[in-house]
Amino acid sequence: MKIIIFIAFFLNFSPLQIFAQEIERNSRNDHEKAIKAVNEGEILTLDQILQKINRNFDGRVVSINLKDSEKGLFGWVYDIMMIDVNNKVKQIRVDAGTSTVLSVISGD
């Protein structure tokens, strides 16, 4: 990391710019892995997942995060946060390959 900062300083880049570029590169790689997983039938599309969520839960989805097995999980999962009709936050974890709801955590 010290070498990267030194090179960044020498080339007139700020460490923040290099950090932002690294985040963008990782995001692009994650996006490409997710597209590949959908195309290979490993996971369902977000539309398919949301159809099931909207049938089983009343509320508004405010956040969705797709995580893969490289992040310590056993397979791909969608972590979905929604606000229900009573303005309570629900965190729903869904198996991305089967659309099975794995867990629901409700806020007070």
Image (cartoon, rainbow, N blue to C red):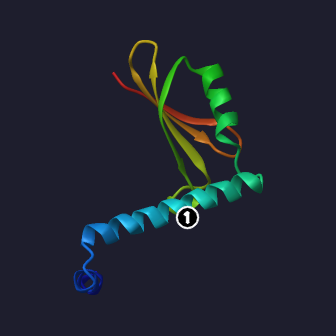
Q: Quadrant of residue 31?
A: bottom right
Is 83 drawn above or below residue 28 in the view shown? above
Tell me the residue at 35%/64% (across/down).
20
Q: Residues within 10 Å of mark 1 (few under 14, many from 20)?
A: few
* Amino acid marked by disc 1: Asn
Q: Is residue 11 left or right of residue 78?
A: left
Query: Which quarter shows the N terminus?
Result: bottom left
* Residue 59 on image: x %, y %: 50, 19
Is 101 drawn above or below residue 70 in the view shown? above
Query: Which quarter shows the C terminus?
Result: top left
Q: Which residue is mark 1?
A: 29
Tell me the residue at 62%/54% (across/down).
75
Q: Quadrant of residue 100?
A: top right
Tell me the residue at 57%/20% (across/down).
57
Q: Quadrant of residue 18?
A: bottom left
Farthest top residue in view: 86
Q: Classify mark 1: helix, strand or loop.
A: helix
* Residue 84 on image: x %, y %: 46, 18
- Count of labels in the image: 1
* Residue 41 on image: x %, y %: 77, 52
Tell me the residue at 27%/76% (across/down).
13
